[in-house]
Image (spheres, grey):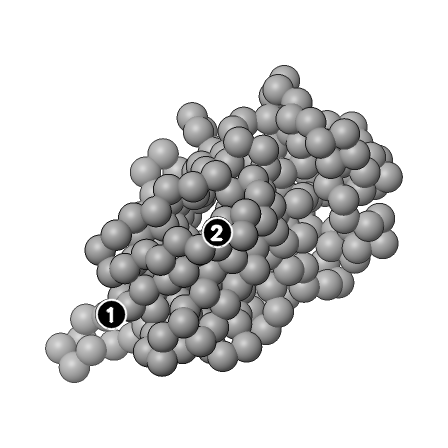
Amino acid sequence: MTDTTIERARSTERGDGSHAPRPRHLPLEEINAAVALHVRALRAGRGWSLDELSGRSGVSKGMLVQIEGSRTNPSVGTLARIADAFGVTVARLLQPAADRTVHLSEMDDAPVLWRGGRGGTGRLLRGLNDPDFVELWDWRFAPQERYEAEELLPGTRCMVHVLVGQIVVTVDGVDHLVHVGQTLDFRADRAHTYRNGLDSPARLVMIVAMPPGDFDRRHGSLIAQR
């Protein structure tokens, strides 16, 4: 999550004396602290050592120590590997300790987990862990910008709907051009890339649906949740 901040709403007085939300930046340290708390709790709940989590996730023990100590800023790929190992969404690693049955959130509340070199962003709007594992993302690509995604959990599917411009989604080396108003559904447990080949911005919303269960990268196996 390089150079990532979250914006949250705060009250700003209008001319009529009422208050309207205005975004503020949530320090990156608070994001890292939330991730550290959830990773420690999930690992302790399963009785896993750091070595066990490292083996299951493919993330080095040293990096896990840094994450649990809230001393590093993990990339979205690293968070995805840890979430896969626990059998949860990335959003689960970021959510407040107490959640609600009904949840209304603002765009400005959603964490930016990817920033492209040209100014694009990948923002995790919301994630669900019950009854199914689903994530909702907002992706914005600057002209000529691309994002190379890691292979996701076996059986994971993505749905991409283009709101602005067009996006080329490359899956297993095959290009799929998705125009504004079109939706692409594909298996995301293989190499895939998103690319905006235009000289104008592009924007899409993405739904990621994952099968339940812990994943052990040492054996490439999905383990049913207990």
Please provide percent x and percent y for residue 63.
79, 55
For the residue pair 89 and 100, the one nearer the viewer reads as 89
Residue 29 sits in quarter: bottom right
Q: Is residue 212 visible?
A: yes
Identity, as a three-letter code, of the amino acid under mark 2: Val
Which residue is label 2 attached to?
A: 174
Which mark is drawn over residue 96? none
Q: Is 124 on the left-hand or right-hand side of 225?
A: left
Which residue is label 1 attached to?
A: 20
Please provide percent x and percent y for residue 22.
32, 72
For the residue pair 22 and 193, the one nearer the viewer reads as 193
- Dot 2 surroundings within 10 Å: few (below 14), some, or many (20 or more)? few
Identity, as a three-letter code, of the amino acid under mark 1: Ala
For the residue pair 52 and 173, the one nearer the viewer reads as 173
Please provide percent x and percent y for residue 126.
41, 48
For the residue pair 130 and 217, the one nearer the viewer reads as 217
Residue at point 24% right, 70% down? 20
Residue at point 54% right, 52% down? 173
Residue furthest out toward the front: 174
Residue at point 40% right, 77% down? 143
Q: CA distance from mark 2 to mark 1?
A: 47 Å
Instruction: Please tell me how many numbered marks the rendered image carries.
Output: 2
Residue 47 sits in quarter: top right
Q: Is 143 on the left-hand or right-hand side of 151?
A: left
Q: The residue tagged with tag 1: helix, strand or loop? A: strand
Q: Earlier in the sequence, mark 2 or mark 1?
A: 1
